[in-house]
Amino acid sequence: AKEGHFAIGDWNDTVHRGIPQNTYAYLPLTVRIIDGRVFVWDDISDEKPLNRGDELLSINGRSIRQVIEILYSSTPVDGNIYSYLERTVEIGFPRLYYFHVEQPTTFEVAYRAAGAEGEVTALKALTRQQQVENYKARNKTKSRNPDPPFSFDIDGKRALWTLTTFS
């Protein structure tokens, strides 16, 4: 239909509920898609062999181009807005792979690190909860800015709102 304001199923139907219930184990990566190429954004696997910016070349023997084509063809979008299609697949890549490509217990991932030849690694499929735990464990020591992003003061009929950062 090329009309992206609908979805087939939701997290409560029998097909999808395994994600929030942590019974489905799937690809523990988040990605960014740029011009049909897929790059690692975050590796939340137990092993963590991949780094941000590594380019995915294939998964379990399928070229990344084949994977992307499968996911693009099974994703509802708004008309012919290609960037919307890319972002939609990018956001749901691990789950879409699980539902539309395959459901293995391990992934053989061929990738290319910046400035290197292609390499291959294996990643174990993980449930959502396992991925969240890995993410939290790796990011708990990152410093947070203790200062609030703004200050607010009221003096009579005047209010002063000061932004300390605009990011």
Image (cartoon, rainbow, N blue to C red):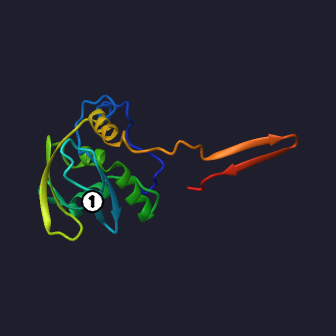
**Secondary element at tag 1:** helix
Percent of width and height locating residue 163:
66, 51
Q: Residue at x 14, y 66 (%)?
A: 118
Residue in front for this viewpoint, 78 or 21: 21
Front residue of this view, candidates 7 and 28:
28
In which quadrant of the rendered view does residue 140 lie?
A: top left
Residue at 77% across, 48% down: 160
Which residue lies at the image location 17% right of the left edge and 69% below the top edge?
116
Residue hosting label 1: 68
Side of 12 relative to 40 (left or right): right
Q: Amino acid at mark 1?
A: Ile
In the image, residue 23 lies at what x, y percent?
25, 30
Find residue 106 and report its image quarter. Answer: top left
Relative vertical location of residue 151 with respect to residue 90 in this rendering, above or below? above
The N terminus lies in which quarter of the figure?
A: bottom left
Question: Horizontal placement of 131 versus 117: left or right?
Answer: right
